Image (cartoon, rainbow, N blue to C red):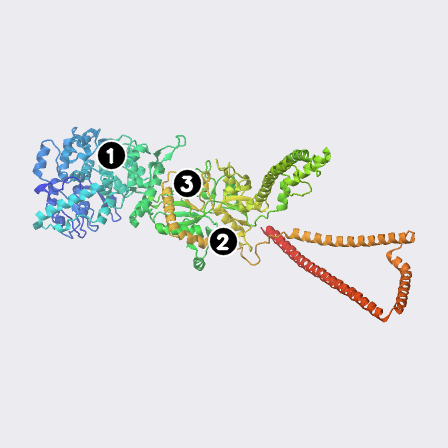
Amino acid sequence: KQGGSGLWWGNGVAALLAVTSLATAAAQTCPTATCLRVGADGNCALSNFVGLSCEPTFWSRHIAAFPGKWHAVNNLTSNPVQPGIEYLEEKLPCCRHCGWSLGYPIAVPEIMAISPDQANCASRTGAGQLSQCYLDCTKWGGDMSVLDITGDGYLNSTEFQRYISDYFVAPPQLYALYTGGGLTYDAEVSRLDASLAFWQVDLDKDGRVSRDEYLMFRHFVGPILVSKAGPTRSPSDGRPLADGPFGGLFLDQTLADIWATNQVNIMLEHYITNRAKGFVSSVARPPVPYERALMMRTIDIDGSQRVGVDEHYFRLFADKNKDGSLSPEEYYGSLYRKTCAALSSSGAVAADCGGLTGDGVRADKGDGLDAKMNFAVHDIDSDGKVSFLERKFVSSDLDHSGTISRDEWRHGDFPEAYGPFEGHAECDDDSDGRCEKIDRLRYSYYMAFHECASQGSRAYNKPLSEYPWAASCPLVVQVEDHKPFSHVEVFSDAPAKAALEARGFLCWDSNEYEEQNLCITGYAIHAFDDIAKRLQWTYTPRLIRATAGARRQAASSGASVALSSLTPPQINGNGAANAVFQMGLFTSYQMPWRPPQYDPEDFRCSSSLWLDDGLIIVKRTALKEVNVELAIVEMLITPTFVNFVVFIYLIVVVLGHLFWFLERSDNALFAEAYTEGVIDGMWYSIVTMSTVGYGDKVPVTGIGKMATILWMFFGIISFGVFSGNVSSQIALSSLENNIASPVDLASFSVGVIKTLASPAVENVDLDKEFGFSQVQCEDINDCYKKLQNYQVTAFIAPHSDVYNYFNATGLNNEKCGNPASLPGAAFTTETTAAFTGSTVKVCSYSKSVYAAQYLADAVSLTQKKMKEDGTSDELEARFLKQEQPNEDAEGCGEPTRYKIALIASTVVIVFFYFIIITIIQRRRKIEVQKAVLSHLMTSVTGRNLSLSPMECAKKYGTRWLEKVRKKRFEREEAKRKRLAELGAHDYLVHIVKRCRRMALQQTNEIRNVIHDTHTARDRVSRLVTFMTFFGLLLVVVVVCLTIALLVLWSNIVRLIDV
């Protein structure tokens, strides 16, 4: 701890501890009180004791006794035992400033009251000095008399600052932290701003400190003086302590810890000394860690980790019934500025209001501030009571302008955990976006957020870093009916609700925020429900309702139905702690996030709830068949090919002349004449360059051969380049099949929804960013039609909107798969991240509403944890993966890569060409035979024969046959005669020779027959093979044509259905 041990009071110190007891009967021991509220029985329900005027003699009798025996001091006999702090608040409210509660144990907090040496304090007071009995309330009045130079019963700013500069540091060596390290006060180096300290103590803002205000201040500052230390919690912006919250006059955790230690030490010393009087030292103990944290949380109402004078007074003195707020009666019984109007028909006006003017303003405070400081002005949320946050707005408004400036915000100690000044301030459009003030409306948003978050923190015992939220602050989450992200069903009775819940729906009964009974399922709502459960949030959904016409009208005007439904918190007189906060669970692209319809700064959104959120490319599922023939034809008319042909032709002409000139003298293959020779040279050049090498012309000269070698290399290179161009042309035709990312869209025609492009969204040009030709679409349906009609190669749209469209139109349920596919992952860019970085997200209205940032950060952080533990993957597998196309259905195989129509037409042409050629050849053969026979007959007979071969055979066949037979008969007779003349031996030789000739002739005939048989068999085999192949091919052609017709018919039917 800082400072001394706390045992410096000596024998004159008395410390008293309150113990657990029962409630006692009421007794009035303080000066006469006024009645602030009359109960239904006619008795006073809420009394207002006149001032903090604890009579020294009366109080001395109490501090000399054990708190458990204070009833004896007060002569109470019925049910007397009561905890010390409760006794002070109920029986001795005028002496409430004389005791300090430790705040623990929780059930019966300990109380300490101090009475230093009376003689020493009296002697110093008599000498015109302030007493150093910092905890003796009976001496504080004398101290004020010393400071009150004017003798008017009040301390003005100069008189009060004398206490800071001359006496607050006495003895100076005990309070060096507040002096900047020196032994005397110096405003230049002091860590305490005396003017801001005066502003705190002046509760009613009348420019002076009354006796009660001074006594309350001494109760606040006593523990600081005893602790001999200053606060250690410096401003986070690096400013000096005196230029920070409360001007440096506050109690922080460090001081609270030192004060708790000093209290225990003081009590132990006194209890041990006075054990015989009934004091038990065992009850004096330091706080445990939980009690230590609870102590600071109890006294720190606004959660700033600093406790100022006003906060101290509000909790201990103004809030008489300890409910955390001031009723009208409590407010008008406090030291705060007020007017003196009647509280209610049954209530009475406080008697100490002083003289009234005709306008109801106190005569002694006629500075015009009454109207600004009264109860109605404090009650910002119009709930009939004043919370400390409401009081804080009025007290922080130093210039009484009705707004809080940046400096007032800093000095007023508004917790950083609840957002910076800019997060709540009203920003002027004409001040370069600077935010310079917070008015009452914006402050009501701050209060609502503060109450909901702080009450959630206390209820769930969670720091603000874990984003608690009070159940009393409804979170109304607006949802869209967009399957598969959030599908809404309405139920009418309990069985219907049970049936939907059995199917995995989340159900809510109708309430004040939603008139219908809703059951919702889908990825987004289940993801948000998981987030809400982890954060312990309570929420209720509300369905966004808008007709198709309203949505079209909103889209045409650049508005958004969903965004229009988001508004600031609704307090509606229910108090800031019951404010209704709206959130939008968006599952589709909300356009546009730009002025004048919507300013991006007006909304805060979480990170995406979906891992694959962003923009997505959509293209046709069917792969584009590359038409090589068409690609070649297209290549023939391209400028590149035409220029190449012209260039080659010029070179061939030049080289033709060169080769002719080199070879004409020595090479007979090149004509010597110029015309024929140049043609020969050009022919040789093109044959050699194309690497055909026909061979009819070759060089014979040495220089001709060398030129030919060089020309060959040039030809190889030239035709290699040409072949590469042909391949590139074919590859370009297949690039559409390789689209997988935005960079692959270059040079294609791509559809873009008009709400994703300029001028709908400024400075966003996807076509320029990725190099494609942009075709604007009205919506996704328009883009899909253009895609199927081949007006665009692909289109770009938000991923969630594409999913919603596929499900709404049933495209994901096609038997053979969705005609449109998503080739790559979702993407976003620098220019699109601001408005399409995510579409499945939670958004809130954030203009001057820092709660939107708080809620969005909570959702984002929890969603990150869901991604890490796999919950997001499980939800995606449950709700999104099952919506993938059914491409493996029966009869949905990959189409054949063969061009059936081209193959079939080619086969038919070849078949008919074969038949025609065969017929033509046969006819030509008959005509040739006829011509030859006619020529022969004409030559033999000498006459022109016009008869056909058949007629010739009929006319001349019989005559020729008779001649042949006659000659054969004559030859046989001649042989017979010749054989008759031969001998037996010669006849035998003749017979053998003849048999031999006949055998050889027969052998040759057999060979010919065998050869003819093999030839016929081969012909028949080839014919059978050809006919079999042709028959099978014809069957395949018929089947493929039938399938093609069926597919074409099904596509036509599908388009008609769509």
Q: In which quarter of the image is residue 239?
A: top left
Q: How crowded is mark 3: few (under 14 residues within 10 Å), some or many (20 or more)?
A: many
Q: Residues within 10 Å of mark 1 (few under 14, many from 20)?
A: many
Horizontally, residue 883 falls left or right of residue 146, namely right
> How much space separates mark 1 and mark 3, taking CA atoms?
35 Å
> How much space separates mark 2 and mark 3, taking CA atoms?
32 Å
Reading the chain from its start, which is encountered first: label 1 or label 3?
1
Q: How crowded is mark 2: few (under 14 residues within 10 Å), some or many (20 or more)?
A: some
Farthest bottom residue in view: 984
Front-most of 644 and 131? Answer: 644
Q: What residue type is labelled 1?
A: Leu
| SS type, badge 1 | helix
Q: Which residue bears the numbered disc 1?
A: 241
Q: Which residue bears the numbered disc 3?
A: 603
Q: Which residue bears the numbered disc 2?
A: 883
Please tell me whether residue 161 is drawn above or below residue 545 in the rendered image.
Answer: above
Residue 698 position, x and y percent, is 67, 40
Q: For the residues labelled 2 and 1, say whether their Cβ atoms are less than 8 Å apart.
A: no
Horizontally, residue 183 falls left or right of residue 299, namely left
